[in-house]
Every structure is written in structure tokens, then in C-alpha cells.
Image: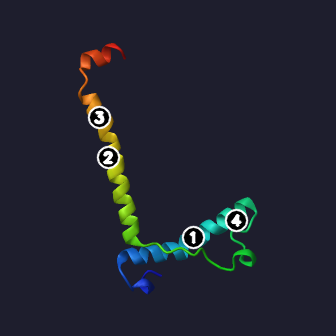
Amino acid sequence: MILALNHGQPHDRIVHLAKRLVVPFVRAGIGEFLHIEIFPREVYQFSSIPAEVIPRDVAIICISAFFICSFAALIPAYFAARLDPVKALRYE
């Protein structure tokens, strides 16, 4: 199966493999568990979920989230570093 996916970059192969193997199993598993059909073809007029994963967008989102979380952690760390440890532990 992987040998047939020799086009594109390695991340393209992983995304393609996930779309072909993982998504149908998850969709079928949830549908069987809840006894419903997810995205009925009669209503939505498509046989698969119309999504395109753009690796550049994923990278931008991950890097942005990392920097936002790091900055949010620096604010309390700055105030904690300015405290006198003896006074901080006395009121703990």
C-alpha cells in the first residue's frame, strides 16, 4: 500500500494514508456505535468529508500556538521570580 503512494513528499503520503485508512474506520466505528449514518449521502451529496489539509497552514497554527502558550507562561513566571521565597512560603 505504501509503495503505491510514491508521489509527493513524505507528509503527503502520511496525509493520504490517513485519509484512506483511518477516516473510514473512524467514520464506520462511530456510526456503528451510535447506530447512525454520519453525513448521509442523500442529504449532503458527497461520499467523503471535503477537507484539504495544507501542511503550511498546520505549521503556522502549531508555531503560533507554541509562541502564544510560551508567552502566556512567561507572565506568571516573571511575577513568581520577583517574589521573595521566604515571604511566599510564609503565606502558603
Residue pointed to by mark 2: 70
- The secondary structure type at the circle numbered 4 is helix
Residue 84: x and y in percent read: 23, 20
Q: Quadrant of residue 75?
A: top left
Q: Residues within 10 Å of mark 4 (few under 14, many from 20)?
A: some
User: Nearest the camera: 11 or 2?
Assistant: 11
Q: Seen in the image, is 36 located left or right of residue 10?
A: right
Which label's residue is closer to the chain start, 2 or 3?
2
Residue pointed to by mark 1: 23
- The secondary structure type at the circle numbered 3 is helix
Residue 89: x and y in percent read: 31, 17
76, above or below 72, in the image: above
Residue at coordinates 60% horizontally, 72% vertically from top-left?
Answer: 24
Q: Amino acid at mark 2?
A: Ser
Q: Mark 3 or mark 1, which is nearer to you?
A: 3
Using the image, tell me which numbered label, if any, was put on residue 77: 3
The alpha-carbon separation of the residues under discs 1 and 2 comes to: 32 Å
Residue pointed to by mark 4: 31
Residue 62: x and y in percent read: 38, 59
Q: Mark 4 or mark 2, which is nearer to you?
A: 2
Residue at coordinates 73% horizontally, 68% vertically from top-left?
Answer: 37
Q: Residues within 10 Å of mark 2 (few under 14, many from 20)?
A: few
